Image: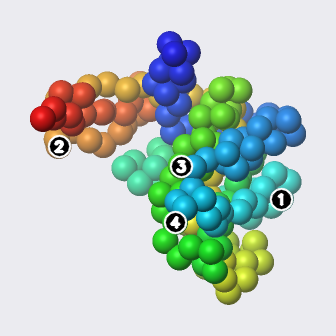
Amino acid sequence: MDQLMELLKTRRTYRRFRQREIPQETVEEILEAARLASSAANRQPLSYIVIREPEKTAQVFGFTRWAGALPPELGQPKEGERPVLFIAVVENLDINRDCDTDAGLAIGNMTLAAWNRGVGSCMIGACDKAALSELFGLGENQKLHTVVAFGYPSHESHIVDMESPEEFKYYLDENRDYVVPKRKLSDVVRYL
């Protein structure tokens, strides 16, 4: 149980990556973790598109926006820091038109399985979904939910206790590592 809690504490959002290929067996493990996620009424409306060829990942990257709490020059990964893998999460509208919970569970599984192998991730909803849907060749019954970026992190990310509700924005420290304020457990839990 201690290992799981440590994984949960350190599986943060990572936005700068080493340019090192992720082994196919790790990619398959990430996808298997998504497949195993719980699904409302077990309808399983999600499918996944893997983008790992450098020219395709560059195309996908061009349609994404990163680290909205930071100025672009600090938050946007630069050349040599970009993800080496994207996985698109696609909804099948014929199966379920409202599957945000399913997608959240699948993405949580994927990112945790990736981090178990030292692969960091960033869930990206801030993207040009129309352009990416066209690039991915999605049909009328399909909707792009999210793209998730993966790679071996080239920075660290730390959690600190949030001292006031106004201090929610993450920031970079002097080493360009991410610092992520989190509300304290006593601020988010109430027992009846």
Q: Residue at x 81, y 51 (%)?
A: 52
Is residue 56 visible to the viewer in this orientation of the structure?
A: yes
Residue beneath disc 2: 166
Residue beneath disc 1: 55
Residue beneath disc 3: 105
Residue type at mark 3: give it: Leu
Q: In the rendered image of this protein, does residue 151 appear above or below residue 68?
A: above
Q: Residue at x 80, y 61 (%)?
A: 56
Left or right: 119 in relation to 160: right
| Label 1 with label 2: CB-CB less than 8 Å | no
Q: Earlier in the sequence, mark 3 or mark 1?
A: 1
Residue type at mark 2: give it: Glu
Q: Label 3 to label 4, Cα distance in Å? A: 10 Å
Q: Earlier in the sequence, mark 2 or mark 3?
A: 3
Mark 2 vs mark 3, foreground winner is: 3
Q: Label 2 to label 3, Cα distance in Å? A: 28 Å
Is residue 71 visible to the viewer in this orientation of the structure?
A: no
Q: Position of residue 146 (x, y in %)?
A: 58, 61
Quarter of the rendering containing residue 60: bottom right
Badge 4, how many Cα within 10 Å: few under 14, some, many 20+?
many
Q: Position of residue 121 (x, y in %)?
A: 60, 41
| Label 2 with label 3: CB-CB less than 8 Å | no
What secondary structure is found at the residue carrying circle 2?
Answer: helix
Name the residue furthest top: 2
What secondary structure is found at the residue carrying circle 1?
Answer: helix
Residue closer to the observer: 179 or 138 = 138
Badge 2, how many Cα within 10 Å: few under 14, some, many 20+?
few
Q: Earlier in the sequence, mark 2 or mark 4?
A: 4
Q: Residue at x 67, y 45 (%)?
A: 36
Residue beneath disc 4: 99
Q: Label 2 to label 4, Cα distance in Å? A: 31 Å
